[in-house]
């Protein structure tokens, strides 16, 4: 591989630590597409003959076919995907195969391959997130008026609607989609032409390769072109936050499925049994999705740590970006798909949700707000009066609506009968009709708007 200067082969351990073919073979499609675009440019610029160009392209197509049919023999001796492809190309077409690497280095080649791979991955993940949003929106539509307890500190706070709760995640995944699209916009420049680091003395045209590979433009600085891995970090950062969101929803699913909650159940399709306890139904898919975030955030930390302190330009350290990148992308893809499956699968238990939402004085705030509106108390005083009434009800072990008018008037004489109308969970959610509030009517509207913002054929990432 290293030509004239090298007489001895590498030490066994050198070959082992150096080789990346075990994982970078995943870049074969991007590597070959890049070589085809580069070859076309070399021919167009008169650097390689049309005849050699045709042979190179035919050979590359054959290599791709061999890889895709599983017949290709990857070799650790040939270190990485670039040498594996070029080596086989030369076997197939002879010395002309050696011309494809004119005006190119593995440094701009790997920068290109990873960029294309991240771009392809974003283009696959973005519609998957859209599909997850579609699943959440459909379930929110169905449960626009289903009442559940809303929590802060995981303590019953106020009644909310299940649809409203699900729509909160639609917003989160919408932001995740837009972060991925932003990352795509910034990464979409071609590093080809930078060669090893300083550019090439051949009369190349980097604009041609950029255009052929659907990049917006060639990168402006050759040193940056071979050393920049910002797009890998940005992608994994966006993936990390998406994974955090998936993890939060997973945790809710795990809680909601558990016997003390019983808000939802998952079918056989998304649970597993126990080898010892025949009654068990474990939400493994949710637990695994909850945990995947660990690997993805781990990849983020790995990448930042690998890149920090690296002097310009290329360093072999950069080879260590691939396994974390691939693992983060694979984990995220699995998590998104599993979550969409669970959201579609889950069966809500509205009676149980409503019962829990009605307990624990969840409408106390509605009583305080009523005292402000009808009696004209300052909110702080209304809060105090309500607190006393909750105390009395709690001592008696009853709900607020079970207190008699006389008992209420003993605390605040101006309370009248109309107070009972605000003491139901339905009245509580229906009263919250302001922008962003939980009222069923709002959920219906939010669902229609979200379909337009996030699912419209012409819309990308809610913009
Ligand atoms: N396998 C290398 C990587 O992943 C490719 C580039 C190697 N370049 C070099 N000059 N050794 O980064």
Image (spheres, rainbow, N blue to C red):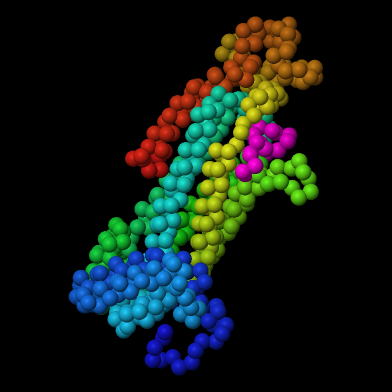
Q: Nearer the viewer, residue 18 or 338?
A: 338
Q: Nearer the viewer, residue 339 or 61?
A: 61
Decide if residue 457 is on the left or right side of residue 287: left
Decide if residue 368 is on the left or right side of residue 215: right
Residue furthest to the bottom: 7
Residue 201: where, in percent of width, then height?
25, 78
Residue 263: where, in percent of width, then height?
66, 32
Residue 271: where, in percent of width, then height?
65, 44
Say which quarter of the image contains residue 151. top right
Q: Nearer the viewer, residue 196 or 366?
A: 196
Say which quarter of the image contains residue 387. top right
Name which residue lies at 69% across and 17% down: 385
Name which residue lies at 65% across and 42% down: 268
Is residue 430 in view from this perspective? Answer: yes
Q: Is residue 19 positioned above or below 360 on the image?
A: below
* Residue 264 painted magenta: yes
Q: Is residue 383 positioned above or below 93 on the image?
A: above
Name which residue lies at 30% across and 58% down: 214
Q: Which residues are magenta?
A: 255-270
Name which residue lies at 46% across and 30% down: 447
Residue 38: where, in percent of width, then height?
29, 70
- The quadrant in which the N terminus is found is bottom left
- The quadrant in which the C terminus is found is top left
Ligand 1 positioned in quadrant: bottom left
* Residue 388 painted magenta: no
Is residue 315 in view from this perspective? Answer: no
């Amino acid at each position: 591989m290293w030509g004239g200067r090298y007489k001895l082969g590498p030490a066994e351990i050198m070959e082992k630590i150096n080789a990346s073919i075990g994982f970078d073979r995943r870049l074969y499609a991007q590597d070959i597409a890049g070589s085809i675009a580069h070859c076309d440019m070399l021919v167009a610029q008169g650097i390689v003959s049309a005849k050699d160009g045709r042979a190179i392209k035919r050979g590359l197509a054959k290599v791709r076919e061999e890889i895709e049919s599983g017949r290709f023999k990857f070799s650790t001796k040939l270190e990485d995907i670039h040498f594996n492809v070029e080596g086989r190309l030369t076997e197939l077409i002879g010395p002309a195969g050696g011309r494809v690497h004119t005006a190119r280095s593995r440094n701009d080649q790997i920068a290109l391959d990873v960029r294309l791979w991240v771009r392809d991955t974003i283009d696959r993940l973005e519609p998957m997130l859209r599909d997850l949003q579609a699943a959440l929106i459909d379930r929110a539509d169905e449960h626009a008026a289903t009442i559940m307890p809303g929590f802060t500190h995981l303590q019953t706070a106020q009644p909310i609607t299940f649809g409203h709760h699900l729509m909160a995640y639609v917003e989160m995944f919408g932001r995740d989609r837009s972060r991925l699209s932003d990352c795509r916009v910034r990464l979409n420049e071609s590093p080809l032409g930078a060669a090893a680091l300083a550019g090439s003395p051949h009369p190349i045209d980097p604009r041609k390769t950029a255009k052929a590979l659907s990049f917006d433009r060639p990168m402006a600085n050759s040193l940056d072109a071979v050393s920049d891995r910002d797009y890998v970090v940005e992608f994994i950062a966006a993936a990390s936050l998406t994974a955090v969101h998936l993890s939060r929803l997973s945790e809710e699913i795990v809680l909601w499925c558990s016997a003390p909650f019983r808000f939802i159940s998952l079918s056989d399709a998304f649970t597993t049994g126990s080898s010892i306890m025949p009654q068990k139904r474990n939400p493994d898919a949710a637990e695994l999705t909850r945990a995947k975030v660990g690997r993805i955030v781990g990849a983020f930390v790995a990448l930042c740590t690998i890149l920090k302190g690296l002097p310009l330009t290329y360093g072999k350290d950069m080879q260590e970006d691939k396994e974390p990148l691939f693992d983060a992308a694979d984990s995220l893809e699995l998590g998104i798909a599993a979550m969409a499956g669970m959201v579609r699968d889950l069966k809500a238990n509205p009676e149980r949700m409503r019962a829990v939402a009605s307990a624990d004085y969840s409408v106390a705030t509605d009583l305080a707000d009523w005292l402000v509106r009808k009696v004209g108390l300052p909110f702080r005083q209304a809060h105090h009066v309500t607190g006393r009434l909750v105390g009395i009800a709690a001592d008696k072990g009853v709900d607020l609506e079970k207190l008699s008018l006389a008992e209420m008037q003993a605390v605040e004489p101006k309370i009248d009968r109309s107070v009972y109308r605000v003491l139901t969970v339905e009245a509580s959610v229906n009263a919250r009709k302001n922008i962003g509030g939980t009222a069923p009517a709002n959920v219906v509207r939010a669902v229609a708007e979200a379909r337009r913002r996030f699912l419209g054929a012409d819309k990308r990432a809610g913009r």
